[in-house]
Amino acid sequence: MERAAKAVGRLAQATTGSPVLAAWLHRSRVEAVADIADSQGRRVDPNRLRTLLAQVPTRALRDWGATMLALDLMRQMLSDPSPPTFAPTSMDGALARMEEAHATAGPAVLVACGVGFFAHLEAGGDRSGACLAVSRFLAAQGMTPLPLPCLNGVEAIRRAEPDGMWLVAFLDGIARQAEQGEDGLTALLHRWRGWRRRVGDRRSDARIRRAVDAVAAEGVIGPARLAARLRCATSAATDLLEELQRLEIAVEITRRRTHRVFVAEDLAAMLGEVAPRPAVAAAGAVPGIAPVAPAEPDRWVEPAEGVDDALANLERILKRQDPLLARYGRIAGASGEE
């Protein structure tokens, strides 16, 4: 419990005031919903989720509703808590179990979270509702400044043994997720600063700086999506992405004239493309010393989270896929929505 509390505290402190918080949250949500869906026996490719959320055209994939399940989980993760007039969801039931356990466990928030998680599963609740409730419960109790998607209890489900101690597995899993989340946030911050240095000395409101922020946030992006973010022509957005590719910040994975898709340099290997490497210096040549870029304040030029856009896009996708959602028991009317 001490290790888990310290890890969660360090992660909460790292997120406070971080200039890449919006980008990290988006990436963390994609990975979290893929893990939660996997815990229910539905294999989901996080990269496919990134392409769908970025509104990049993709081929239809017959995965028996796994991707739609992940998108539905993303919608629940992004949406506000359900009003009392709506039918309670599984996440609401898990939150109620955690609050009941907290009333008896006292100040031990993580213990109450684990006990409520287990009680929800024992009562027949689904795993996704319990996993989604973890981050909201910790934020409601003040352990984190906002719900952090990486804290979801999936590691506890993977590590739990039939005759083992659930609470130990839960605390160990939360500690691991918090440590991995802090490492990911720190790595993204260093990577974003490096990309900004590659852009060079430009004015603070230059479009290319905002393009770097968009690529860092979404990971997968096309010219049309970038043009909508920057409110510029598609041709100008294409030029910006080609410039980012020249600077080795983004990598194109389509190699075609229309519907071009670019990914962030750190995700290129995951999507089957290796970022271009700098030319090797000739034998005997003295490598030049790169000029030191002036220090600049860590200021995110444009909020890149895009919650409203993501919700609107998810609503359009899910509305067209109600038959697929009905196959695994998630239809629009089940949660009281119109």
Image (cartoon, grey):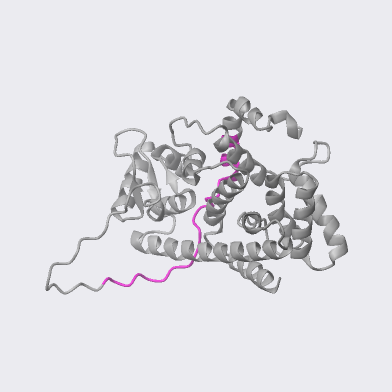
- Left or right: where does residue 130 sit relative to residue 245? right
Residue 193 in picture, x, y percent from top left: 43, 64
- One can see residue 193 in this view: yes
Q: Is residue 299 above or below residue 225?
A: below
Direction from residue 31 to residue 93 in the image, left or right:
right
Task: Give x and y (percent) for residue 285.
Answer: 13, 72
Q: Position of residue 208 (x, y in %)?
A: 38, 52
In the image, residue 58 lies in the stretch drawn in magenta: no
Residue found farthest to the left? 284
The residue stretch that appears in magenta: 290-314
Examine the image and state in which quarter residue 235 appears: top left
In which quadrant of the rendered view does residue 88 lie? top right
Decide which of 121, 334 is in the foreground and name it. 121
Overall secondary structure of the magenta section: loop
Residue at x 74% of width, y 46% of height: 91
**310 within the magenta span:** yes
Q: Is residue 276 above or below residue 282?
A: above
| x 12%, y 70%: residue | 283
Residue 183 x %, y %: 52, 66
Q: Quadrant of residue 224?
A: top left
If the image is split into quadrants, where does the N terminus sit? bottom right
Residue 338 visible (yes or no): no
Judge from the rendering whether residue 192 lies leftward or rightward of residue 199; answer left or right. Answer: right
